[in-house]
Amino acid sequence: MKKVIISMMVVFAFALVAYAAATGPATIDLAQKFEVAAPTKKAVQFPHATHQGKLQCVDCHMTDKGGALKNQKTGAALELKGVKGMKNAAHDDFCWACHVEKKVPQGKSCTKCHK
Ligand code: HEC
Ligand code: HEC
Ligand code: HEC
């Protein structure tokens, strides 16, 4: 009996690790990810898990496994590397576009994301 329980726990632990790997990190440093070279604002610590709980993977990614991000305005794949300045694609084509559409409270307030 004990052996059965232990092997079940091992299987469960592996399943958890596999699940975490498949859904990506719970929080993601986007200044690092989007290669912000000369930051003027605090790096965005993106609450990935929180969003996953409210939305479908394909609302943000091109596939339900993650991978390339989706431009919220055109639905095409979005490359976000070397983000700089206020008028950037991370704001206009991704985060802000959805926050406005979904009427997220303070969805464009600087300190909601840069904190
Ligand atoms: C609100 C938008 C959003 C939703 C919903 C979302 N993601 Fe993500 N995801 C991101 C962002 C932003 C990143 C970080 C940027 C990147 O990796 O290109 C990311 C990163 C990832 C990564 C890590 C990629 C890497 O290179 O390390 C995986 C894996 C992933 N997501 C899978 C998923 C899966 C599976 C779902 C659905 C269960 C999901 N995501 C839902 C926005 C989202
Ligand atoms: C496809 C839609 C979508 C995209 C894209 C999106 N968000 Fe959100 N975001 C939401 C929704 C919906 C909520 C509200 C969740 C709730 O009900 O509290 C939210 C809430 C948040 C919150 C508050 C979370 C909390 O704990 O209260 C932060 C911070 C945030 N988003 C940051 C970002 C950043 C940074 C990006 C871009 C990298 C982004 N979001 C892209 C839909 C989106
Ligand atoms: C919904 C989330 C969100 C909100 C709200 C937001 N930003 Fe951003 N911003 C981002 C993301 C994501 C990046 C790219 C990653 C990073 O810089 O951490 C970024 C990058 C930037 C950059 C370029 C990088 C840098 O540090 O210089 C500036 C400037 C900026 N934001 C200014 C602002 C200002 C000013 C406001 C308020 C008017 C604001 N942002 C509101 C998500 C947001």
Image (spheres, rainbow, N blue to C red):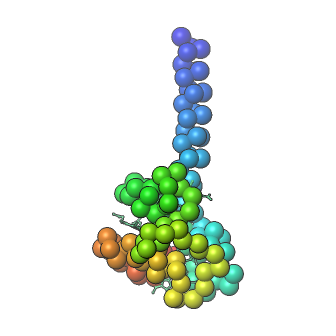
Q: Is residue 104 above or below residue 58?
A: below
Q: Nearer the viewer, residue 76 or 110?
A: 76
The residue at the far top in this view is: 1
| Residue drawn at x 46%, y 77% as measured from the top left | 93
The residue at the far right in this view is: 37
- x, y (%) of residue 69? 52, 65
- x, y (%) of residue 19? 54, 42
Q: Nearer the viewer, residue 90 or 110?
A: 90
Q: Is residue 66 found left or right of 106 in the rendered image?
A: right
- x, y (%) of residue 62? 50, 60
Dividing the image into four equal quarters, which quarter contains ligand 2? bottom left
| Residue drawn at x 41%, y 61% as measured from the top left | 59
Residue 50 appears in view? no
Q: Nearer the viewer, residue 10 or 58?
A: 58
- x, y (%) of residue 77? 53, 68
The residue at the far left in this view is: 103
| Residue drawn at x 57%, y 27% as measured from the top left | 11
Q: How many marks?
A: 0
Q: Quadrant of residue 57?
A: bottom left
Q: Is residue 46 above or below residue 49?
A: below
| Residue drawn at x 46%, y 81% as measured from the top left | 92
Q: Is residue 99 above or below residue 4?
A: below
Residue 55 appears in view? yes
Q: Is residue 1 found left or right of 109 in the rendered image?
A: right
